[in-house]
Image (cartoon, rainbow, N blue to C red):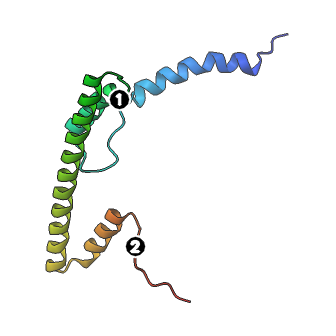
Amino acid sequence: MGEIKADSKSALISPNLISATKKVVGLQRRKSAKKPWITKEMLDKMEERRGYKNVNIDAGRQKYRSLNNELRWEANRAKEEWWENECKEMEELARRGRVDILYSRVATVSDGNRRGRVQGK
């Protein structure tokens, strides 16, 4: 009679919901870096490297290897610089006696992973 089935209701609602979500939230075109030391240039180089991953000619393999080596070198250097800056900031907090901020910073950097903690019996 005048009943609308659930499938047809979802077919009517879905396009409107998707378009409204795109307007409000927006589209995320690329994943953001999970690590704080990864830069936009590194992400671009990762995209370029991904394009050469399955190229089965010698030139493609060489380009992939060279991009991979450059990327690894840049990431290691950036990670080392990031850790140096973090340690300097934490040392400064300790020197000023801001232990509360220092402990919260250590917790965020370590993601709650505390190695060497003695567990009670």
Whether label 2 touches label 1, CB < 8 Å: no
Query: From the viewer's perspective, is 26 left or right of 100?
Result: right
Query: From the viewer's perspective, is 94 left or right of 4?
Result: left
Is 4 above or below relative to 101? Answer: above
Depth check: 75 or 16 in front?
A: 75
Q: Quadrant of the C terminus?
A: bottom right
On the image, which quarter does residue 98 sit in?
Answer: bottom left
Q: Residue furthest bottom?
A: 121
Q: Residue furthest front?
A: 58
Instruction: Tell me where residue 119 appears, x and y as whole percent.
Output: 49, 84
Residue at horizontal 63 percent and vertical 16 percent from the top = 12
Point out the tag, 2 or 1, that comes first from the N-terminus.
Answer: 1
Is 105 above or below relative to 42? Answer: below
Residue at horizontal 23 percent and vertical 41 percent from the top = 69
Q: Disc 2 vs disc 1: which is toward the camera?
A: 1
Q: Which residue is mark 1?
A: 53
